Image (tube, grey):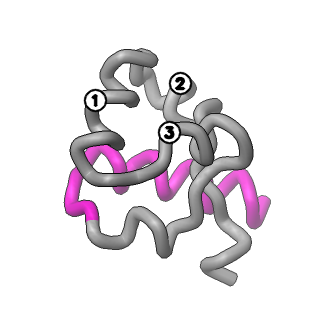
């Protein structure tokens, strides 16, 4: 289900995003960087962000989670 899928730092890195870009993007959207780094964030926590790059990362995380 949707709450099992988490976006991790690893997913973002695999999609080609750098640490400083990730940091800037998520602080701008009020998402906890500490939580992102520690355990990942749920799709619910990023649902308010409309961004094509993030959508791609979400798809990757879904594939990784649901095999």
Give me the residue at 26% from left, 52% from top: 29
Q: Which quarter of the rendered picture does the C terminus lie within?
A: bottom right
Tag 2 secondary structure: helix
Q: Earlier in the sequence, mark 2 or mark 1?
A: 2
Tag 3 secondary structure: helix
Q: Main secondary structure of the magenta part?
A: helix
**Separation of disc 2 and disc 1 at Cα?**
14 Å
Residue 53 percent across, percent down from the top left: 30, 43
Look at the image and say whether residue 65 sits in the magenta stretch: yes
- Is residue 14 depicted above or below 18 in this figure? below
Q: On the picture, is 51 further left or further right than 45?
A: left
Give me the residue at 38% from left, 29% from top: 22
Residue 15 percent across, percent down from the top left: 47, 30
Q: Earlier in the sequence, mark 1 or mark 3?
A: 1
Closer to viewer: mark 2 or mark 1: 1
Q: Which residue is mark 2?
A: 13
- Is residue 58 depicted above or below 48 in this figure? above
Disc 1 crowd, CA 10 A, few/some/many (<14, 14-19, 20+): few
Q: Which quarter of the rendered picture does the N terminus lie within?
A: bottom right
- Is residue 49 depicted above or below 32 in this figure? below
Look at the image and say whether residue 63 sits in the magenta stretch: yes
Closer to viewer: mark 3 or mark 2: 3
Viewer-side residue, 66 vs 47: 47
Q: What is the magenta range?
A: 49-67
Q: Which residue is mark 3?
A: 33
Residue 49 percent across, percent down from the top left: 26, 61
Residue 9 percent across, percent down from the top left: 59, 33
Task: Answer with the quarter of the image where residue 6 lies.
Answer: bottom right
Residue 24 disc label: 1
Tag 1 secondary structure: helix
């Amino acid at each position: 289900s949707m709450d099992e899928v988490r976006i991790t730092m690893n997913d973002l890195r695999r999609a080609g995003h750098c640490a400083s870009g990730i940091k800037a993007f998520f602080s701008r959207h009020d998402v906890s960087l500490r939580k992102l780094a520690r355990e990942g964030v749920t799709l619910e926590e990023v649902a308010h962000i409309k961004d094509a790059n993030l959508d791609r990362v979400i798809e990757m995380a879904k594939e990784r989670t649901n095999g």
